[in-house]
Amino acid sequence: MYSFARWAGLLLGGIFTGFLVCVLVLENSLRDYDGKVYTQVRQVELDSLDTLASATLIPTIIATAILVFAALKAKGRDLWLPLAALTLLLLILVLTLIVNLPINADQNDWNATAPPSDWADVRDTWQTSHLVRTLAAIAAFGLLALSAITHRTTTPQTAAERT
């Protein structure tokens, strides 16, 4: 089960991280456009991308928590990388819940032909939070990858191997 959790977390974490990087590139491209274009594109993004984020982030958190639990149980050296990754993933979740999702809900109700007067400030807040989430996801994915590479499976030694 722990091996499955390790690879599931790595795979889903990679998909999640790649998704965040793509959104970051798209959002950066939108900075050159006016509020009408920005609002239209954001509302298209909000149609399904939140579902993709949830479908990849939540299982990644669960899989990483399983790795942390297994490392605590084994009292080995494999604890610190998944624990750091889990901390970053939880930071992403908290930031998403506190900053990004409330803004998403507001933007979904914006009129694309007449965005609110503070649309650029709202955009900047969302994009700054998204940049932090993306950097944290890249770091968490790197930690999970390093954990998978450096993980040592322990097998019981026979009496002949110990001598």
Image (spheres, rainbow, N blue to C red):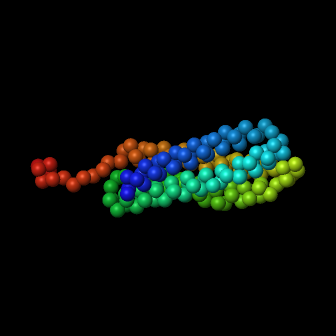
Towards the viewer: 135 or 161: 161
Q: Kindly tell me whether residue 139 is visible in this rendering.
A: no
Q: Kindly tell me whether residue 153 is visible in this rendering.
A: yes
Residue 109 placement, left or right of 143: right
Q: Position of residue 120 (x, y in %)?
A: 80, 47
Can you tell which quarter of the image residue 55 is in? Answer: bottom right
Q: How many marks?
A: 0
Residue 163 placement, left or right of 83: left
Q: Position of residue 93 (x, y in %)?
A: 59, 57
* Residue pictured at 71% horizontal, 59% vertical: 102
Q: Position of residue 126 (x, y in %)?
A: 71, 51
Residue 54 placement, left or right of 8: right
* Residue pictured at 64% horizontal, 46% vertical: 131
- Is 127 situated above or below 32? below
* Residue pictured at 43% horizontal, 59% vertical: 66
Quadrant containing the N terminus in the rendered view: bottom left
Residue 109 placement, left or right of 160: right
Towards the viewer: 36 or 52: 52
- Is 113 situated above or below 70? above
What residue occupies the far right of the structure in this picture? Answer: 114
Q: Position of residue 11 (x, y in %)?
A: 48, 47
* Residue pictured at 15% horizontal, 53% vertical: 158
- Is 98 situated above or below 163? below
